Amino acid sequence: MCNQSVGLIAGVIEKAGIPTVALSLLRMVTMKVRPPRSLYVPFPFGYPLGKPSDAKFQRQIIRAALNLLESSEELPILRDFEPS
Amino acid sequence: MARLEDLKLTHRLFVETYPFRTSDWAPGACLKKPLSQSKFALISSAGLHLPDRPPFDLAFRGGDFSFRELPNTVDVCQLKISQRSSDFDQTGAKEDANLVFPLDRFRELAARGEISGLNHRHFSFMGSITAPGRLLSDSAPRVAAMLRKDRVDAVFLAPA
């Protein structure tokens, strides 16, 4: 249910005028909840930033998510994380 | 990869039949500045809390919809997890809380000039909420109002 909660919180904050971007661990849930901007990450529950103690990889995920904030695509955006 | 098949059978059946809510945010907000000039706040749904603050109420019917403030100065190693979801494997997060609340990573991005900085506070929820009515009508709007008051430019959220 974490993916629903995060998507709903993102929507409330976005409606208050602050842009949001969220990670998603379950594409099916995010497609139903439809938050404004989501980066789907192919990791297990409990591992949204990929790997513990891997700062470089975690930053890579964050940068991919933050890039969605500067996208001119129509909302909602649901993009897959693609490790480089 | 997190898959429905990884959930316990009862949880999987629940998720497959649960009437998920649609997020209501139209028309959406725009980032008004480049990332390098934007101040961020973080939100985690992992059920994190400071060791001297009350944990989330794991017996709350429908899921505890409250939130906890996490100061920007916090050492993420000190954070505790109270989370009722048995699907959330806490092993990695207990080794490195940045896995669910990447505050150290955002500090690094700020130090590199990729973002302008971080808000003085961040927020944590316990995301295992099956009845999100009061999340939507009470706690999430309160957090949104605080983030507006803090003049946060953008928010990053992570589930668990």
Image (cartoon, coloured by chain):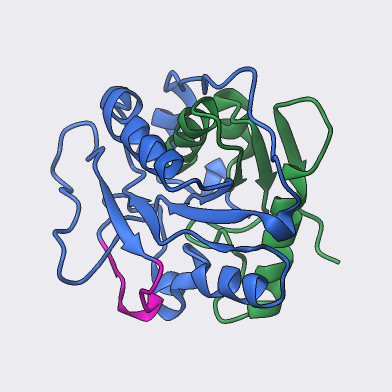
Looking at the picture, tell me which residue is in the foreground, B92 or B30: B30
Give the quadrant of the C terminus of chain A. Answer: bottom right
Looking at the image, residue B50 lies above or below residue A36: below
Q: Residue at x 75, y 44 (%)?
A: A68
Looking at the image, residue B104 lies above or below residue B128: below
Tell me if B77 is positioned left or right of A23 in this view.
left
Q: Residue at x 56, y 36 (%)?
A: A18
Looking at the image, residue B121 lies above or below residue B84: below
Q: Residue at x 70, y 27 (%)?
A: A76
Number of callouts: 0
- Tell me, what hue is chain B? blue
Question: Splitting the image into 4 quarters, where does residue B70 fall?
Answer: bottom left
Give the quadrant of the N terminus of chain A. Answer: top left
Q: Is residue B78 magenta?
A: yes
Residue B74 placed where, x, y %? 36, 74
Looking at the picture, tell me which residue is in the foreground, A52 or B148: B148
Residue A75 placed where, x, y %? 73, 26
Looking at the image, residue B69 lies above or below residue A51: above
Residue B69 placed where, x, y %? 30, 56
Residue span colored magenta: B72-81
Q: Residue at x 43, y 53 (%)?
A: B44
Tell me if B150 is positioned left or right of B117 in this view.
left
Residue A16 placed where, x, y %? 49, 28
Tell me if A26 is positioned left or right of B83 in this view.
right
Question: Splitting the image into 4 quarters, where does residue A31 fall?
Answer: top right
Looking at the picture, tell me which residue is in the foreground, B38 or A31: B38
Which chain is the one coloured green?
Answer: A
Q: Is residue B123 magenta?
A: no
